[in-house]
Structure formats: C-alpha cells, structure tokens
Image (cartoon, rainbow, N blue to C red):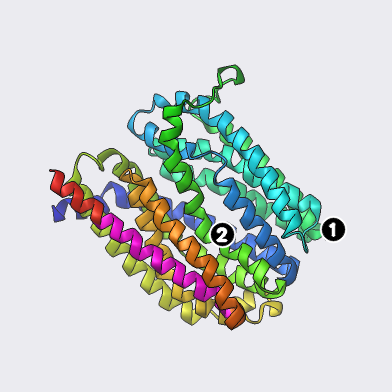
Amino acid sequence: MRLLGLTALNGPIARATLRTSVVLGLRLLVQTGTLLLVARMLGPHQFGAFAGVAALAVMLGTLSTFGMHFVLLSEVSRDPIQCREVLRYAVPTTLLCGSVLLTIYLLIGILVLSDGVPMPALVAIGITETLLQPLFGLPAAEHLALGRIARSQLLATLPLALRLTAALAVLLLQPTDILSAYGYGYLLASLIALAVATFSMPAPWPAPKRWRLPSSAELRNTAGYAALAVTANTPTEIDKTLAARLLPLSSAGVYAAGARVIGATTLPVIAMMLSVLPRLFREGHVQRQRTAQLVRLVLIATCAYSFALTVLIWFIAPFFVYLFGVKYHDLGHVIHWLCLAVPGIALRLAAGSVLMALGKPWMRAGFEVVGLGIMLVGAIMLTARFGTVGMPLALACSEWVMTLLGWTFVVACMRSAQRER
C-alpha cells in the first residue's frame, strides 16, 4: 500500500501538481505585481481601507453560489453529463443569492467600513465579488471536475492578470481619485474574464427559460457546501476586515500587505490539493486503503513544505520593506510575527480539502467556525493589548486551532471508514 501511495504522488497526481504549480506560480507573480502596485499607489492608510472592504466582499461572495460550485465539482467529476443539469439551478441561485449579498455588503460597507473608500470603488468591488466572480467560478469548477486542473487554474488567473493591467493603467494615467479608478478596472477585469470563461465552457450556459430553482433535496445537498464556501475563505479574509476596524488604517494597511504575502506562499499546497481532489471525490468512499495512504502522504508533504517555507520567509522578511516602499517600514516586523501562522494555514487548507472530498463538509465548516470565533475574540483582545502585533497573534491562534481540529476529524473519519470495512 505504501508503494501505491508513493506511485500516486510520483505519478499522475505529481505531474498534475507540477503543472498546476507552474500555473499557480504564474498566478503568484500576477498577484504579487498587483499587490505591490496597488499598495504603493494607495499608501498604507488607503490600502488598509481598500483591503478591509475587498475582504468583506470576498467573504460574502463565497456564499453567492450557495455551494453550487462544489456540487458541480462533485457531480461532474463522477459523471460529466450532469454538468448541464447542475448549471440549470446553479446560475439562478447564484444571481439571486449574489443580489441579496450585494445589498448586505453595501449596508455594512457604508455604515461600518466606508472611511477612506469612495462610493464608486465600494460599489464596483461589491458587484465584482458577489456577482461576477461567483458566476466565473462555475466554469472554473467545471474544468477542474473534468481533470483539466491546470486549465482551470489558468482561467482563474485571468481576472487577476486583468486587475494587474488595470493597476498599471491607473499608475500610468495618474487619475485624481486613484481608488475609484482602480475600482472601475477591478469590475471591468471580471467582466472580461467572465466573457472568456463563457467561450471556454464545454457546453454553453443554460438558456434563461431552462433555469429553475433547486429542489428541497438539492438544497439539502448543497447546504453543507454552502456553509463550507463561507467558512473556507473567511479565515483568510476576515482578519483584513477586522484590522481595518480595530487598528489605525495605516497599521491595517501594513498588516494587510504582510498577510497577503503570507497567503500567497501557500499556493503550492493549494496546487497539490487541487490535483488530489478529483481522485479523492471518485475513490474516497470506495478504495479506502489507498485513500488513507494518499492522505498520509499529503500530510507529510504539507508539513515539510510549510515548515521549510516558514524558515525562508523569516530570513527574507526585511526584503519586503524595499519592495513595498518606505511607507511600509514596519512590514518586516509584521511578517516575522505572521510566520507563526504559516504552517497552520497550509495544514488547515489540506485538512479542509480532505474532509470536503470525503463527504464531510459539515466537519470542515465546524472546525472553521470555531477558528473564526477564536479569530474574532483574539483580534479584539490582542490588538487592545499589543496593537498591530495582536493581529498576527490572533491569526496564528486561529489557524493552529483549526489545524488541530481539522486533522483530528480527518483521522476520526479514516478510522471510522476502516472499521466499516
């Protein structure tokens, strides 16, 4: 069985991981370029405000599909013919939920987070993340389910590359209201990406006359994935929104820049899990011994990568100050503290993906809800006591608790499956 597991990581999954890593490497370069341009153009104060509202929009936008992209991934990976049927109710559900969430976002943004963010940028970011990006995620999930992992990630990189283009345009044009101009570009980037995704789909979008709302059985099937969609991205976004509320905006901007740097370093783990997911969906309930071996190897690979990465980031942290500019002079210090969270983030992502593939979305949602509670309480208490350093400490506490709970649930599931054999 050990040889089977090693073959899995040295065979198709390893090759898929390598291809996906190359695409995600491109994505990392694009994200890094956009982050540097936007952060330097806006400065810490306005970047902190922008990061707060953008994180809020992303968090709410993850619920727009009500978990339909996970259902699409699960169903199409087993039977590609199911794609059209799932899209019939996935598209109207996304539009309906996204419209409600856009309203909620605007209310929160105006009442709580509007300081430093002009209304055009607030609205553009909201439309992008609650409507356009969720719709865009459906074709990307379809390609992933069909085993086109690198193509799926290349498609997902497109709006990011277009945002980089928008940031470059703003830098060259030097408009009076930089954030509003970038907001328009942010919106246009996702519109263009959605058009390209539409042409890349194996089958066209279902016509509006064929749309329908999901049945009660289908809603029950998606409920766990909907909760999963919220909790999956919220741990990596809520800290920026909290920082914009709990810290001076300049400090929040420095923290958000550091957190984005740390988040980008987990892309190889994401690449590995994206490569493994289709196989886990297919075999997770059938070939349980091979699945258990594969999960163990995923855990070992994630541990080795994340701890090595932590050491590397610790030593190169001062270099990021030169990249972001003198206004971010405290960035190296913040990244040093954020290193505490790096292994926890990587291991939490791996555990969550395994539980999802094993058909345990509620377990993933459960440990992530606990982590969110710890993040919220920890951020309030620790920023009051330690200032800016309190945010990295709260993030590390949250990520490590989620990691321990997540892998405890994975082990429990694997043992339960072995007893059923």
Q: Residue furthest right?
A: 176
Q: Residues within 10 Å of mark 1 (few under 14, many from 20)?
A: few
* Res. 280 in view: yes
Q: Nearer the viewer, residue 33 or 290?
A: 290
Q: Residue furthest top?
A: 209
Main SS of the magenta part reads: helix
- For the point 31% across and 52% down, the residue is 14
**Lateral position of residue 406 relative to residue 23, left or right:** left
Number of marks in picture: 2
Q: Residue 19 location in percent, x, y?
A: 40, 50
**What's the magenta region?**
389-411
Name the front one of labels 2 and 1: 2
- For the point 24% across and 55% down, the residue is 412
**Lateral position of residue 252 relative to residue 12, left or right:** right
Q: Residue 96 location in percent, x, y?
A: 62, 33
Is 392 a magenta residue?
Answer: yes
Residue 409 figure quarter: bottom left
Q: Residue 417 location in percent, x, y?
A: 19, 47
Image position of 339 with respect to 399: above or below: below
Q: Residue 108 location in percent, x, y?
A: 70, 53
At mark 1, the secondary structure is: loop
What amino acid does circle 1 point to? Pro
Residue on which the image places disc 2? 237
Residue 331 figure quarter: bottom right
* Res. 16 in view: no
Mark number, residue 175: 1
Is 203 a magenta residue?
Answer: no
